Image (cartoon, coloured by chain):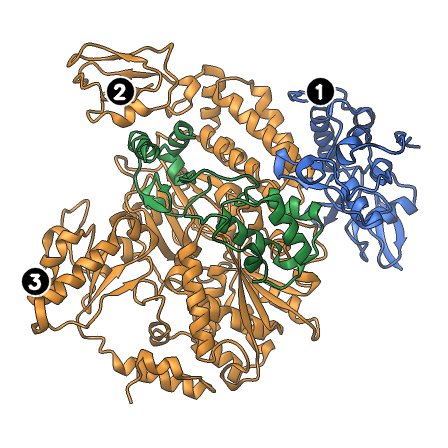
Amino acid sequence: MLSLTIDGKKVEAEAGWTLLDTARQYGIEIPTLCYHEAVEPFGACRLCVVELRQGDNSRLVASCVYPAEEGLEVYTDSEKVNNVRRWILEMLLSECPASSEIKEMAAQYGVDTTRFEITDPEQECILCGLCVRACAQVVGANAISTVGRGAQKEIGSPYLTPGDDCVACGTCVTVCPTGAMSARFERVRGVPEVVMVRSVKG
Amino acid sequence: MQATAKDTAELRLGSLEELEKLRGELRAAEDPNQTRIIVCHGTGCIANGSAGVTEALKAALAAAGEDIEVMPGIKTTGCHGFCSRGPLVIIKPKNIFYQQVKPGDAEEIVQKTIKAGEMVERLLYEHPQTGEKIETTEDIPFYAGQERVVLANIGQIDPTKIEDALRAGAYAGAAKALTNMEPKEVIEAVINSGLRGRGGAGFPTGIKWNLAAKHEGGQKYVLCNADEGDPGAFMDRSVMEGDPHAVVEGMIIGGYAIGADTGYVYVRAEYPLAIKHLEKALEDAKALGLLGENILGSGFNFDIRINRGAGAFVCGEETALMRSVEGKVGEPVPRPPYPSDKGLFGKPSVLNNVETWANVSRILDKGADWFAGLGTEKSKGTKVFALVGKVNNVGLVEVPMGIKLRDIVMEIGGGVPGSDHFKAVQTGGPSGGCLPWEDAELPVDFDSLIAAGSMMGSGGMIVMDERDCMVDVAKYFLGFLEEESCGKCFPCRLGVPRLRETLKRFSKGEGTVQDIDDLYSMAEAIKAGSLCALGGTAPNAVLSTLRYFRDEYEAHILEHRCPAGVCKDLITYSIDPEACTGCRACARACPQDAITGEKKKPHSIDESLCIRCGMCMESCKFGAVQVQ
Amino acid sequence: MAQTAIDIDIDEIIERYPGKPEYLIFLLQDIQAAFNYISSEALTLVCDHTGVPESQAYAVATFYNSFSLEPKGENLIHVCLGTACHLKGSGLIAENLMVNCLGACALAPVAVVNGEYQPKVTSPKLMKTVQKLGDE
């Protein structure tokens, strides 16, 4: 067992656990968007960042991928951590204004409005990549991927046209943190054979 | 027996002794005191027509017949560094330096200098202050202030001939390491030398190697980052074009040290000449037994493969580069695990920059103590810089670490045209920051640059003057990073465009002081939260320009004024009636037909139609078009 | 200049590399060089050969700048937008014409027209070159 501290509290972790695993074991809440138990952690949304302090040094790491180590001094709720979370959420409010889940999470961190311009009022996709990873790692269909790069990146099937690789299992819709995947399901798979119900988050 | 190129084609060296014997024979075959002509075939000089100069010199030599004493053949080399003066021709052994040579000068060079030993005065470098003509390379201030370690052979050797490289000392270090040292002794030497990575981060190279070496056995890799994506940087290109064996040798040493049998060089596709010269170097090294199985009879096997970039700056990031070699999108991955534990194809890997590898060759050849004798206490050795922008001597320089910024720009660089100072010097590319004139005495080393709000980076050094707008510079770098962001992590994908938007508003004179204050908070979030150094350093350009040039930002947003006369929305173009001759060159160039006037009389620009494209200013030969 | 599809046998290109995922980018580069773009048929052949799923190959083909999924024009002009060139006004030149740092900063601003470097280029000069190419 590894001994470390989280928010001043002494905790124990098994070898192989991440900081997120350890925190959750102790009921310490850390927000995530691109994390899901069914797929490999990705470290992309950066909402799960925590602060590691060592003497005068401090740095932020993604808790979903950072391994628990002996002697770490971890802070999940510091000013630096919350600064990152608030700015990401405010930017997401402008990027994905149609997502109620984002609005809810942002409100939890005191972010109710965004100063940034809204270019696509219908957008819900946060580009967490969970759908892509689930389709590849869980289902093995590899029907979708990221398309393009940078701010123009989007999720889709090859040539952004419906294809045969999709088996209409709906796993992507299940893991999607917002309503984005259910809204675009038809673009990936021509005619939906099953009516997909948007997953309800508990 | 005198060794010739033909001989080396059939040789395969089986030991250090055989290598040194060949080296001795090659050196004996060339008399260093004989006259010989060198023409720079670096990309810059080639673009300026040096290939034509070479042809003309060949013809002139042939026409001059056999009564002149000169080594046959013109030696074409890589970049000599003084790019703004190309095409360059050097006459050995005196190192006579001729600049801006044209094919039409060839005849005179052969007749006057080669035949009669006299100077062609008009081709000599002229000291800008004293007006004195300088004859030899060593006396030219541009070269006098440099310490050429990595660049030592570039400009002296034909990079496509391994014989030249061997004459210059290539593979002596590798032979020593493989034959007389244990892998851990090699690592110790690199640690003791104090070498820090030259790609930008400055991580101690030997320590990085140790982390990979500690894994016992199994597949491992060494990689060379030759992606050189920073705009304005061409250090690595010049090394690969001009002395590729330096890199090959370094990687052999690194592979031996950590226990890797395969090396990958990841070169950006925009460097076709570098790739060509590297491929030739690999071919020649392999033929001689300096690469491949049982190198020099040591029992060590090592081979190198070349991967070409596909147009993504982010692939200069260590883990993104490895993903690209694996055939994937160039998206960085979180660390830990570190590449020294789990890197390329999941194996322990060491990635180093081109310049770092070239330094490794020198260190094993001349010794760790020699290297540690150069530079400063915490920044050993030298650094190659691409000195560009508003500086008289644009080109490639190599200086000892710790040299003052002012000495690089004002002495070696020959100062700023039309001014006695620089406004700012940008180092570290898009990830770095600007240093103001007030920092002219700053020692250029890893830690001093970071303390001043910038960083060493890979070596791009961009000099700016009063006509450069710092808001525009920050906006430019953010625009670049926005284009190149991989898009995986949220702080970078969402934050960099919004930072750029803010800079765009500032450049239009919009925004408030509150916006500047908020910017610090947002910048902090992007810096601390991003997955890799692209996002992590993206705010640096803004933060450093704000630190030293806040008044310029405030002029934009509070006074709607761009002091440098750059930001389009805040400037106007006009024609000075005193200087205008009415030639109508500008009117013809204007895409908006905004310039009117009678023939041969001063013209004027209709501001309501003007889109500030600047084509009028470019076409005017009388300097009559002005910007406010 | 790229040869036409009739001249190049795509199977020959495919056979240059082992059928493993790590050769995906090599294959795309060779196909791009031969045909000036990557057709959907070509992508399928590459996927069959390397075992890479089509979605992943598509992700790679759309991630990197040097790949084009649609045929590109005949004459290629690159204007260097590197910092040194930017400071000498290349941004305006590019805007006026309609790329990444070419590493030849002493010649700023630099443009490359169909592979030939043109140093210290100006908008009027480049416009003339474009017009000439258009007339050819």
- Residue B578 placement (x, y as % from top left): 17, 15
Q: Secondary structure at mark 1?
A: loop
Q: Label 3 marks which chain's residue?
A: B
Q: Are marks 2 and 3 in contact (CB under 8 Å)?
A: no
Alpha-carbon distance for marks 1 and 3? 76 Å
Q: Is residue B453 left or right of residue C93?
A: right
Q: Residue A102's spot in the image, x, y percent?
A: 79, 27
Chain of the residue where label 1 is placed in the rendered structure = A
Mark 3 is surrounded, within 10 Å at the Cα level, by few (under 14), some (14 to 19) or many (20 or more) other residues, namely some
| Quarter of the image that includes the C terminus of chain B | top left
Q: Which residue is mark 2?
A: B588
Which residue is drawn at the image coordinates 62% and 44% (left, top)? C40
- Judging from the image, what secondary structure is the residue with disc 2 in? helix
Single out the mark in the foreground, 2 or 3: 2
Residue designated by label 1: A121
Name, please, the residue furthest toward the front. C6
Task: Answer yes or no: are tags 2 and 3 on the same subunit.
Answer: yes
The earlier-in-sequence mark between 2 and 3 is 3
Give the camera-side residue of A97 and B404: A97
Q: In the rendering, what colour is chain C?
A: green
Q: Which mark is residue B111?
A: 3
Write down the colour of chain A: blue
Amino acid, disc 2:
Arg
Q: Colour of chain B?
A: orange
